[in-house]
Image (cartoon, rainbow, N blue to C red):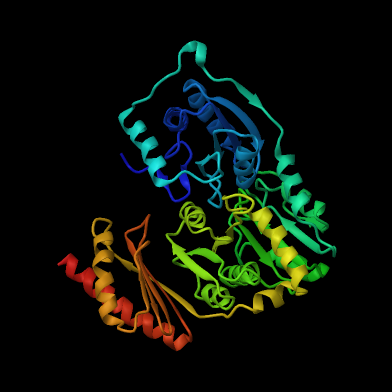
């Protein structure tokens, strides 16, 4: 049986990879594995959401769990409410930033942490072996719909307030943040305009993944209306992207580094977590305040686990997924946007000035063909060879592929999780340094991959 769970839960094309039968089996396996008595369920705006929810809930009820449905809510709201309402588990039905044909399931514990690999494995084994336990007919769970999203909004309003009213344009992209995000930002003191704020699971306005290409219209509106910022969310609200007051896209790495710097500025010795793909500008900004940076595998599940393990004050990936552990352990685009606006106020800077504090380094990426059967072995073999090639290596990480930190940049070699490729990423102090690192690394990778094919 193919592996069900990835770094963001179960995800696939509806009625091909993710069927109602599989959703029901996952619900039953989750109820059995956790011995859950109460489960909170939410979904994003996708057209398949109700179908998948009905199937999932059937499995949960059949396993004896009581289910409360909170309807359409962002993923971070579901995670927060799981703890707030003292549910044993929360399950979010979403495919996040993926296109409309996709949907997925993500499971959260009562502590707002997404299910670990070990917990996911238990569910996968139960489904693979069909080792399900059905509740006695008298013990089948009960279902009810609850309206609880306001509890999340009230939490943010109580803990964050702006003294100066900022003018922001909010683009939910027809996704799950369509109601909560504008309401939250208004409640903390913003003057809010919205675009694409109608719920529509076909995502007709733009792709559910916010990036420079999909946010061109938002950028034009920010410039035309002289707004202080544009804020855009992905399909389920666990990611956020920003447009500065000039209409420029705030680079994911640099805004992450700038916010990490803000969080650690007055907390000497504090630690921050990011993944192996993030720019070295994160280290430059955090270590300037005496802080420490820990790097993890790509995926917010690994990020949240590391944040808890190291007692970090903040964690984020360069895709707009930021985690604020003093609130909860789920990436939260809405909370991140409120906290960023508060940071701008406290530092007395515009968004462009705030981001400009973080240095910018050239990054290069290249894909090298390699069979699925050999790509992971090839990456394992590459680690030692890379260290010999780059004698000045300061640090070698193997948490997700092979990453070497060097004097003038870094190199990352990873096997693609979905394609027959080895991905090479390099970042250098200069474009010349980055090109040199890429040339030497790809030459070595091609040599080793070629040796394995002969």
The correct choice, above or below, for 220 with respect to 305 in the image is below
The percent position of residue 223, horizontal first and vertical second, equals 77, 71
Q: Identify the image quadrant of residue 343.
A: bottom right
In the figure, is residue 439 to the left or right of 78? Answer: left
Q: Nearer the viewer, residue 66 or 218?
A: 66
Q: Does the image show residue 391?
A: yes
Q: Nearer the viewer, residue 269 or 363?
A: 269
Q: Is residue 175 above or below residue 292?
A: above
The residue positioned farthest toward the top in the image shown:
138
Please say if 328 is above or below 244: above
Residue 384 image offset from top left, x and y in percent: 25, 72
Q: How many marks?
A: 0
- Seen at 59% across and 43% down, the residue is 79
Q: Among all residues in the image, which is located at the extreme front?
A: 268
Residue at the spot 51% in from the left edge and 63% down from the top edge: 273
The N terminus is located in which quarter? top left
Q: Residue furthest left?
A: 454
The residue lying at 24 percent from left, 61 percent from top is 377
For residue 16, what is the image quadrant?
top left
Q: Nearer the viewer, residue 161 or 73?
A: 161
Residue 179 seen from this side: no
- Please indicate whether residue 157 sits to the left or right of residue 1 in the image: right
Which quadrant is home to the C terminus?
bottom left
| Residue 103 in the image, given as x and y percentages of width and height | 52, 42
Image spot of residue 352 (x, y percent): 70, 75
Q: Is residue 255 left or right of residue 16?
A: right
Report the residue at 50% width, 73% height from top: 279
């Amino acid at each position: 049986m193919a592996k069900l769970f990835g770094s963001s839960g179960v995800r696939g094309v509806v009625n091909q990879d993710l069927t109602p039968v599989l959703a029901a089996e996952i619900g039953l396996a989750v109820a059995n594995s956790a011995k859950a008595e109460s489960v909170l369920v939410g979904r994003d705006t996708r057209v398949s959401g109700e179908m998948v929810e009905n199937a999932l809930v059937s499995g949960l009820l059949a396993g004896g769990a009581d289910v409360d449905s909170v309807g359409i809510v962002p993923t971070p709201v579901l995670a927060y409410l799981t703890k707030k309402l003292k549910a044993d588990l929360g399950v979010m039905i979403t495919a996040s930033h993926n296109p409309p044909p996709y949907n997925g399931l993500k499971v959260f514990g009562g502590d707002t942490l997404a299910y670990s690999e070990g917990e996911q494995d238990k569910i996968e084994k139960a489904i693979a072996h069909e080792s399900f336990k059905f509740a006695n007919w008298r013990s089948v769970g009960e279902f009810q719909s609850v309206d609880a999203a306001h509890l999340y909004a009230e939490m943010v309003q109580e803990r964050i307030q702006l003294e100066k009213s900022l003018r922001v344009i909010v683009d939910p992209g027809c996704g799950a943040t369509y109601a909560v995000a504008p309401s939250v930002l208004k409640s903390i003191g913003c003057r809010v305009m919205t675009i694409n704020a109608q719920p529509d699971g076909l995502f007709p306005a733009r792709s559910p993944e916010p990036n420079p290409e999909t946010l061109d219209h938002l950028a034009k509106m920010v410039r035309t209306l002289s707004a202080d910022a544009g804020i855009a969310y992905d399909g389920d609200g666990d990611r956020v992207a920003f447009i500065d007051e000039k209409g420029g896209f705030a680079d994911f790495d640099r805004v992450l580094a700038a916010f990490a710097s803000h969080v650690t500025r007055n907390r000497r010795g504090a630690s921050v977590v990011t993944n192996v793909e993030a720019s070295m500008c994160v280290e430059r900004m955090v270590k300037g305040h005496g802080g420490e940076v820990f790097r993890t595998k790509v995926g917010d599940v690994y990020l949240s686990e590391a944040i808890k393990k190291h007692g970090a004050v903040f964690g984020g990936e360069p895709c707009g997924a930021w985690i604020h552990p003093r609130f909860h352990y789920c990436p939260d685009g809405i909370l991140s946007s409120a906290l960023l606006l508060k940071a701008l106020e406290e530092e007395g800077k515009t968004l462009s000035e705030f981001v400009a504090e973080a240095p910018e380094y050239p990054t290069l990426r290249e894909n090298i063909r390699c069979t699925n059967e050999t790509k992971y072995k090839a990456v394992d073999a590459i680690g030692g060879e890379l260290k010999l090639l780059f004698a000045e290596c300061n640090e070698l990480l193997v948490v997700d592929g092979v990453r070497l930190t060097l004097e003038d940049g870094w190199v990352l070699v990873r096997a693609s999780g979905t394609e027959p490729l080895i991905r090479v990423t390099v970042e250098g102090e200069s474009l010349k340094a980055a090109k040199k690192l890429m040339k030497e690394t790809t030459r070595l990778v091609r040599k080793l991959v070629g040796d394995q094919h002969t």
